[in-house]
Image (tube, rainbow, N blue to C red):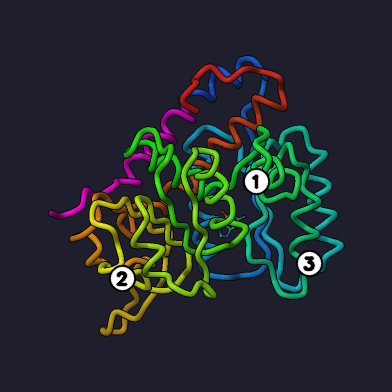
Amino acid sequence: MAAAIIDGKAFAARLRARVAAAVPAFADAAGRVPGLAVVLVGDDPASAVYVRAKARMTAEAGMAGFEHRLPAATDQAALLDLVRRLNADPAVDGILVQLPLPGHVDEAAVIAAIDPAKDVDGFTPENAGRLATGLPGFVPCTPLGCLMLLKDRLGDLAGLDAVVIGRSNIVGKPMARLLLAESCTVTVAHSRTRDLPAAIGRADIVVAAVGRPAMVQAAWLKPGATVIDVGINRIDAGDGRTMLVGDVDPAAADVAGAITPVPGGVGPMTIAVLLRNTLVAAHRRAGIPLADATL
Ligand code: GUN
């Protein structure tokens, strides 16, 4: 039987609508709208696409956007100086430094300079530690979006076997911690894993975040598994154009119980969760309770 398609695009649109609906009450209470600062260094084309989409959706949610585009040659000290100014700016609730940064910049040092209360990406050591130890904080947007889709589909996740493929700080590690907090039995697989098909074959939940086109084969999946494909890979379509494909073989739709498409699955969730995190940061910073418990 063909898998159900998990419509992340529609879920993300509903989440953005709930965020937008909560902005006027915050503005009434705080005397300002939530503000998100985005820092883009250099001219990586994929990053530029994301930053444009972030700016548009921030405005559509009724929030203030502050965009800082810096040349690729920007040095570490200038970047740290900008982060410190954004930390001190009362109109800024969320700070996002678009990754990857150019090679001459110490990415870890820049991330660590962000005020954890404004770290809507959840990348600072403070927020990563909070997630790891079960304290409230900010959780990276892509894995939190994946968790929202999984809970929407499956309800209670307790006791389920989950495999996360990939161990990045942006997706794999926080995803594993979120699934553990939901009482899943979690395996984190990566490039050195000896028997990936065996690990995947046991899993009720598969989250693929490796960045390799169609590397997860349909035949490896347990029939009925729920598959979350985080991959966004641009490949040559053969006719001179490029196409987007995920980390999971499209034939997985014949084996899985439910699967996210690429595009239109996980991708749209990231910005929707970013806006949600910014709204939450604004409320926490202003000491105003958030009325919508679903956010
Ligand atoms: N690069 C790829 N994904 C992300 C993300 O979620 N946040 C930031 N800041 N950079 C990224």
Work out how far the residue at label 3 is from the one at label 2, CA to CA, in angstroms.
36 Å
Residue at the image position 51 percent from the left and 41 percent from the top: 273
Q: Is residue 67 above or below residue 44?
A: above
Q: Element at badge 1?
A: loop
Across and down, in percent, residue 262 comes to 33, 60
Q: Which mark is residue 217?
A: 2
Q: Element at badge 2?
A: loop
Say whether disc 3 or disc 1 marks the residue closer to the N-terminus. 3
291 or 3, which lies in front?
A: 3
Q: Amino acid at mark 1?
A: Gly
* Mark 2, other Cα within 10 Å: few <14 / some 14–19 / many ≥20: some
Q: How many marks?
A: 3
Q: Is residue 224 above or below residue 286?
A: below
Q: Specify start and end residues of the magenta stretch as a single range.
A: 1-20
Across and down, in percent, residue 185 comes to 47, 48
Across and down, in percent, residue 176 comes to 54, 51
Residue at the image position 25 percent from the left and 63 percent from the top: 252
Work out how far the residue at label 1 is from the one at label 2, CA to CA, in angstroms.
31 Å
For disc 1, the marked residue is 122
Q: Is residue 112 above or below residue 48?
A: above
For ligand 1, the image quadrant comes to bottom right
